[in-house]
Image: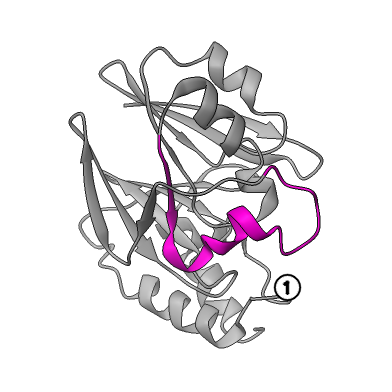
Amino acid sequence: MTIKCMPMGIYQTNCYIVDVNGSQLIIDPGVDAVEWVIENVTNPLAILNTHGHFDHIWSNKELKEKLNIPIYIPKDDAFMLHTDPFGHNVPVTNADVLVTNNQKFDINGINFEYILFAGHTPGCSIIKIENTIFSGDFIFRGSIGRVDFPYSNPQDMKDSIKRILSWDLQNKDYEIYPGHGNKTTLRNEYDSLKNWLHYI
């Protein structure tokens, strides 16, 4: 598996292209992601959204039309694709797959799983491929996603942090590729996440 990353738009939202055996998954194509994505895919299979905020979904519509591939999004955030709740004039589209919690997929031999960690948004999820996590706006290096936006929920974020802190890290670690900023690992973020529980 190889991973390409490009920060997109004014919020420098990380768009990822995950290549497995010559086929690609596109994760969170934000503002102005279309040209970069098209230049870096040869056999694109799907667009995967970690959540519904505009800076993570902006190029969904154009990429779906140009590449003829489906959009996956957590079902509780799907409304953001076609209602533009924050008024940013996001290109409106609909998801092809409304993902439920802990739903597993196999597309052309690429296995991945969505795991719900609500708080930043109702459907905020990570996408797990092997021991790699694409955390969207749940976990960043040294920080977590904001919970003061419309549709955010601080208590849900606390519950989500507690759940991921319960993961067994004795025998394996997880690389984290966040929605903004540099990559990290779950072990590296363990203490930071514990501390955040006191500030939410």
Q: In this rendering, is residue 152 above or below 155?
A: above
Residue at image coords 28%, 62%: 169
Crowdedness near tag 1: few (<14), some (14–19) or many (≥20) residues, C-alpha within 10 Å: few
Residue 48, position as x, y percentages in the image? 44, 43
Q: Is residue 40 left or right of residue 30?
A: left
139 magenta-colored: no
Could you tell me which quadrant the N terminus lies in?
top left
- Which structural element holds mark 1? loop
Residue position marked by numbered label 1 in the rendering: 149
* Residue interval drawn in magenta: 70-91
Residue at image coords 32%, 67%: 101
Q: Is residue 180 visible?
A: no
Residue 130, position as x, y percentages in the image? 25, 43
Q: Is residue 126 visible?
A: yes
Q: Name which quarter of the figure residue 151 lies in.
A: bottom right
Q: Amino acid at mark 1?
A: Phe
